[in-house]
Image: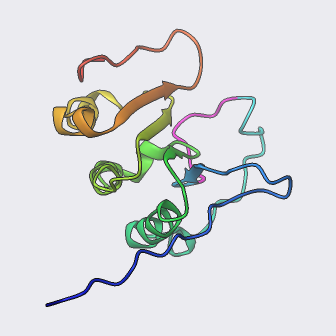
Amino acid sequence: MQTSEPKVALPVLSDNFGRRVSYLRVSLTDRCNLRCVYCMPEAGVPYEAAEDLLTLDEIMRVVTILSSHGLTKVRLTGGEPLVRGRDVIELVKRISRIESITDLGLTTNAVLLAPIAAELYRQDYEESISAWIRFAGKGLPRCQNGQV
């Protein structure tokens, strides 16, 4: 007869004031495809080297570890996260498989969204996770059922 190890309660993440931390914002890149006045000075900004950005596996390692300590909500941001290309779709797929993540978001300017909106909105993500896309700026299109 096999006996299973007792489950060990892992410490819950908290801040210096004892408040529970259940939310993680992941900046996928410092690059953007627009030159908005509020975030891109006229002189430009120095970008991180591509090799200094977290890989998908590194991002997943952080999210997975933190999810075992009470993380339930992840927001993918940037710069403009969609300039990472198809990496974003793969990352959404991977994060949506983590049982404890119940809220997954993407903040975007929506310029690059139309070609991948349907794939990001796939029904299998919607069934298991509260997925949402937040657009930076006013007057940009809304995404519903994969339609922009």
Please state which of residues 17 and 57 is positioned toward the viewer in this rendering: 17
- Residue 94 is at least partly visible in this image: yes
Q: Residue at x 55, y 70 (%)?
A: 10
Q: Residue at x 57, y 73 (%)?
A: 52
- 118 displayed left or right of 55: left
Please state which of residues 23 and 18 is positioned toward the viewer in this rendering: 18
Report the magenta residues as a range: 30-36
Residue 53 found in image quarter: bottom right
- Residue 112 is at least partly visible in this image: no
Q: Residue furthest front?
A: 1
Quadrant location of the N terminus?
A: bottom left
Please state which of residues 22 and 117 is positioned toward the viewer in this rendering: 22
In the rendered view, would you say 48 is above or below 2?
above
- Residue 70 % position (x, y): 54, 56
- 70 displayed left or right of 82: right
- Residue 107 % position (x, y): 51, 34
- 31 displayed left or right of 92: right
In the rendered view, would you say 52 is above or below 77?
below
In the rendered view, would you say 114 is above or below 13?
above
- Residue 69 % position (x, y): 55, 63
Residue 70 colored magenta?
A: no
In the rendered view, would you say 101 is above or below 33?
below
